[in-house]
């Protein structure tokens, strides 16, 4: 089964989460393509989609939102999951999902959404980003919990295997 994994990542942290999810799925026998959402022209070849985005100032990336706009109808016909990478600090902040996630999930009938901790590396930020980080008093560091990412990916692998068995009619 082919899984499309589009990831909108500005500074690489969300990309690496996408790569970790792909690794788990590949180990479970799935074929996975991790791609930039802007580069996707068609999703017909894929049975499932896992769409990820970093969160900046409370919002998903424009490329991830545009991906949903382009393919909403076809996404609704497939098992879809979403993930976000954002909260930093200990305890992680901000809490709660980005506000548009609920709407995006309803549009696609998505099966789930998960927010993972993010990574904030001040050195790699643009000047304007540094100003926002100072304003938000966001704490630099890597707050991604790889075990959580792998557990979530394993749950998806299980659900996809079950979905595939039902779809192919192996079970009455
Ligand atoms: C300017 C700026 C604004 C941010 N705003 C948010 C936010 O509103 N909510 C959030 O959860 N994380 C926020 N973050 C943290 C990033 O989402 C987090 O570092 C993420 O892992 C970055 O992913 P990327 O490297 O894939 O771009 C912000 C980071 C920066 C630099």
Image (cartoon, grey):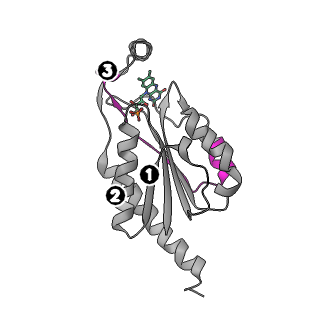
Structural distance between the alpha carbons of marks 1 and 3:
26 Å
- Give the residues in magenta: 103-124
Residue 75 forms part of the magenta stretch: no
Query: Within 8 Å: ligand 1 and the Cβ of disc 1?
Result: no
Upstream in sequence: badge 2 or badge 3: 2
Residue wearing tag 3: 122
> Label 2: few (<14), some or many (≥20) within 10 Å?
some
Residue wearing tag 1: 34
Residue 124, by quadrant, is: top left
**Label 1: which secondary element:** strand
Structural distance between the alpha carbons of marks 2 and 1:
10 Å
What residue appears at the point 63 percent right and 39 percent down from the top-left corner? Answer: 66
Query: Which mark is in front, 2 or 1?
Result: 1
Query: Which mark is in front, 1 or 3?
Result: 1
Residue 108 forms part of the magenta stretch: yes
Relative to residue 82, is residue 122 drawn left or right?
left
Whether residue 88 appears in this view of the structure is yes
Task: Residue 60 in the image: state x and y as whole percent.
Answer: 54, 34
Task: Residue 160 in the image: state x and y as whole percent.
Answer: 50, 68
**Numbered badge on residue 11:** none
Upstream in sequence: badge 1 or badge 3: 1
**Label 2: which secondary element:** helix
């Amino acid at each position: 089964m082919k899984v499309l994994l589009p990831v909108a990542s500005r500074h690489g942290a969300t990309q690496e989460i996408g790569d970790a999810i792909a690794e788990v799925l590949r180990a479970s026998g799935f074929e996975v393509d991790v791609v930039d959402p802007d580069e996707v022209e068609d999703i017909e070849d894929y049975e499932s989609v896992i769409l990820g985005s970093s969160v900046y100032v409370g919002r998903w990336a424009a490329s991830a939102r545009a991906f949903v706009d382009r393919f909403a109808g076809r996404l609704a016909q497939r098992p879809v999951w979403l993930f976000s990478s954002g909260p930093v600090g200990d305890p992680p902040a901000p809490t709660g999902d980005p506000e548009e996630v609920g709407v995006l999930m309803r549009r696609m009938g998505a099966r789930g959404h998960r927010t993972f901790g993010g990574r904030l590396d001040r050195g790699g930020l643009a000047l304007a980003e540094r100003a926002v980080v100072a304003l938000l008093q966001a704490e630099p560091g890597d707050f991604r919990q790889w075990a959580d990412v792998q557990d979530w990916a394993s749950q998806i692998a299980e659900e996809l295997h079950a979905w595939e068995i039902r779809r192919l009619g192996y079970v009455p």
